Image (cartoon, helix red, strand yellow):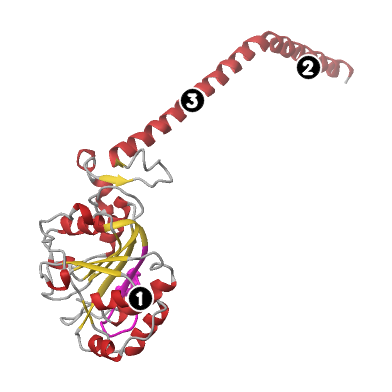
């Protein structure tokens, strides 16, 4: 779908937030065009990256769908690569339905973009695994994909919960989720479910879903499972799904990821151990109470007898002496 005005505005925002501070290597899925008929957006983006003003020729190319991602990223000071079955722009020739990321490209790129490529790939597992494999640890992945309608544009539209599940199972950090109501608007809107009450849906609608993810750990790509069905799915099915474990909980060098079943089992065993310790302590307290009760029982009986005798004497005195 290419990089339009709201994408360039988002890049300006992300630069201010520090996302691009350590980005040197960029990988695009599909060699993308840049279209921006608003020259001030381009000029402000270059200024944010502390680059000189773009040339009139480059502004004209961007305004007329002749500019490319190669030109944009290179001008902003980044090394550019892309993968595409089309050999233009010196692309890495991968068919993302079938091909794996070559070993020399794994974990190499600080910023991997999916500007409207994955929806054209039937093998969704392979394409999102490729994004994961291209990305370096602490690198970013930006997806700008069809959200609503996009009639006959590609094979798929996407939902926010898909990217939330993708982040959960791979321990990605979500940097933001936005909606683009229109290609020509110079901004995206932070995602909230209530937005659906206000977005116009018709045959020409091309709402965009934009998601920024950060890869935090060096671990194999994990297939996500939709959260709403996790609790009603049999354990023998769920044990096939792994979750990358946050390094704050486990040593990432020692345990890369655990199955959900193993994770739950460890938690249950821990709780059982704590409960057993508490039960043993309570049993000891009960035994001590019983021992104390047996020891003081004779004394209690004597005290009780003395109280009864005193009460009887007191009643007799009242009858006799009034």
Image coordinates for residue 75, horizontal then vertical, percent: 31, 78
Q: Residues within 10 Å of mark 1 (few under 14, many from 20)?
A: some
Question: Which residue matches tag 2?
Answer: 311
Residue 180 in which image quadrant: bottom left
Question: Which residue matches tag 1?
Answer: 10
What separation in Å lies between label 1 and label 2 (alpha carbons)?
Answer: 91 Å
Whichever of labels 1 and 3 marks the residue nearer the N terminus, that label is 1
What separation in Å lies between label 1 and label 3 (alpha carbons)?
Answer: 55 Å
Chain part drawn in magenta: 175-196
Name the mark nearer the viewer: 3 or 2: 3
Name the mark nearer the viewer: 1 or 3: 1
Which of the image's four quarters has the C terminus? top right
Image coordinates for residue 55, horizontal then vertical, percent: 31, 88
* Element carrying mark 3: helix
Image coordinates for residue 34, horizontal then vertical, percent: 24, 80
Height in image: 251 above or below 270?
below
| 184 part of magenta stretch | yes
Q: Residues within 10 Å of mark 3 (few under 14, many from 20)?
A: few
Left or right: 100 as drawn, with respect to 162: left
Height in image: 197 above or below 82?
below
Residues 244 and 104: in front is: 104
Left or right: 93 as drawn, with respect to 2: left
Question: Which residue matches tag 3?
Answer: 277
Left or right: 112 as drawn, with respect to 267: left
């Amino acid at each position: 779908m290419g990089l339009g005005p709201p994408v360039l505005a988002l890049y300006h925002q992300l630069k201010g937030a520090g996302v691009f501070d350590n980005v040197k290597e960029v990988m695009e899925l599909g060699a993308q065009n840049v279209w921006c008929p608003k020259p001030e957006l381009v000029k402000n983006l270059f200024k944010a990256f502390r680059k000189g003003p773009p040339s009139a020729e480059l502004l004209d190319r961007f305004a007329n769908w002749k500019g490319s991602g190669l030109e944009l990223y290179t001008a902003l000071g980044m090394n550019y690569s892309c993968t595409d079955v089309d050999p233009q722009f010196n692309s890495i020739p991968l068919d993302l339905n079938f091909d794996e990321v070559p070993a020399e490209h794994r974990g190499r790129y600080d910023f991997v973009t999916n500007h409207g490529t994955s929806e054209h790939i039937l093998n969704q597992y392979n394409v999102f695994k490729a994004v994961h494999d291209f990305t370096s640890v602490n690198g970013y992945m930006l997806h700008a994909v069809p959200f609503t309608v996009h009639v006959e544009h590609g094979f798929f539209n996407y939902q926010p919960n898909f990217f939330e599940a993708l982040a959960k199972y791979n321990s990605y950090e979500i940097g933001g989720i936005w909606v683009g109501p229109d290609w020509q608007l110079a901004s995206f809107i932070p995602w909230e479910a209530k937005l659906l009450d206000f977005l116009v849906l018709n045959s020409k609608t091309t709402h965009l879903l934009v998601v920024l993810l950060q890869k935090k750990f060096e671990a194999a790509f994990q297939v996500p499972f939709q959260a709403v069905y996790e609790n009603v799915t049999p354990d023998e099915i769920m044990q096939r799904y792994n979750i990358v474990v946050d390094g704050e909980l486990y040593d990432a060098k020692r345990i890369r990821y655990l199955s959900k079943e193993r994770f739950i089992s460890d938690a249950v065993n821990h709780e059982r151990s704590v409960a057993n310790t508490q039960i043993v302590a309570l049993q000891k307290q009960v035994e001590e109470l019983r021992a104390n009760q047996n020891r003081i029982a004779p004394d209690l009986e004597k005290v009780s007898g003395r109280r009864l005798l005193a009460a009887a004497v007191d009643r007799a005195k009242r009858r006799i002496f009034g």
